[in-house]
Image: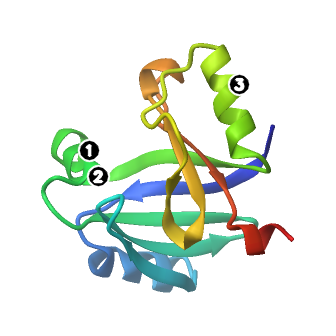
């Protein structure tokens, strides 16, 4: 079903303020920075071994990440698992009564298809399932 942990999402007020820690203290390199208007976020990917750290900065006050920051502050936002077949995982989650935030895949960062499961169904952890863009799967 899922292959590996793809990334750990960290909600931040400002990517620019956080980057010195990740770059100069931890020695990580920026892989990509992009805006994902569909999700209301700007993201920065930093690679650590086979996993990425995804810094999430809200683009506006309506962003789900802004709501997270308002209620919980900066910190771990979600864990994302990579799946070969996102639709199959969504179907399995539905059969097992997992409360999905989005019922069908949405476009996420890096061209991936994504789906989020609500923390009330995943023992307190916001869970993202993602599938690489078609060209990346080959």
Position of 108 compared to 134: left or right?
left
Q: Quadrant of the N terminus?
A: top right
The quadrant where residue 10 appears:
bottom left
Q: Secondary structure at mark 3?
A: helix
The numbered mark, 3 or 2, whose residue comes first in the sequence reads 2
| Image location (x, y in percent) of residue 110 | 56, 72
Q: Nearer the viewer, residue 23 or 80?
A: 80
Q: Position of residue 29 (x, y in %)?
A: 57, 85
> In screen coordinates, is 73 left or right of 97?
left
| SS category of the residue bearing label 2 | helix
> Is tag 3's residue or tag 1's residue first in the polypeptide sequence?
1
Instruction: List the single residue furthest toward the left.
Output: 61
**Badge number at residue 92:** 3
Quadrant where the C terminus lies?
A: bottom right
Q: Is residue 57 left or right of residue 91?
A: left
Relative to the observer, which residue lies in front, 126 or 91?
Answer: 91
Instruction: Judge whether 61 appears above or below 26 on screen.
Output: above
Kindly identify which residue carries mark 1.
68
Element type where label 1 sits in the image: helix
Which residue is found at the position 16% from the left and 63% from the top? 60
Counting other residues with Cα less than 10 Å from the Cα at mark 1, is it few (<14), some (14-19), or many (20 or more)? some
Q: Is 97 drawn above or below residue 84 in the view shown?
A: above
Residue receiving disc 2 = 65
**Camera-side mark, 3 or 1:** 3
Other residues around mark 2 within 10 Å, as few (<14) / some (14–19) / many (≥20): many
């Amino acid at each position: 079903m899922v292959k590996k942990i793809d990334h750990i999402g960290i909600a931040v007020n400002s990517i620019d303020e956080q980057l010195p820690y990740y770059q100069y203290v931890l020695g990580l390199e920026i892989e990509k920075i992009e805006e994902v208007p569909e999700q209301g976020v700007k993201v920065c990917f930093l690679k650590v071994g086979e996993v990425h750290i995804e810094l999430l900065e809200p683009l506006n006050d309506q962003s789900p990440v802004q709501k997270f920051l308002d209620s919980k502050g900066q910190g771990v936002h979600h864990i994302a698992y990579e799946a070969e077949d996102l639709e199959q995982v969504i179907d399995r989650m539905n059969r097992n009564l997992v409360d999905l935030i989005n019922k069908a895949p949405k476009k996420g960062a890096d061209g991936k298809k994504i789906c989020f499961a609500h923390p009330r169904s995943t023992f307190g952890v916001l869970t993202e399932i993602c599938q690489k863009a078609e060209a990346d799967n080959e």
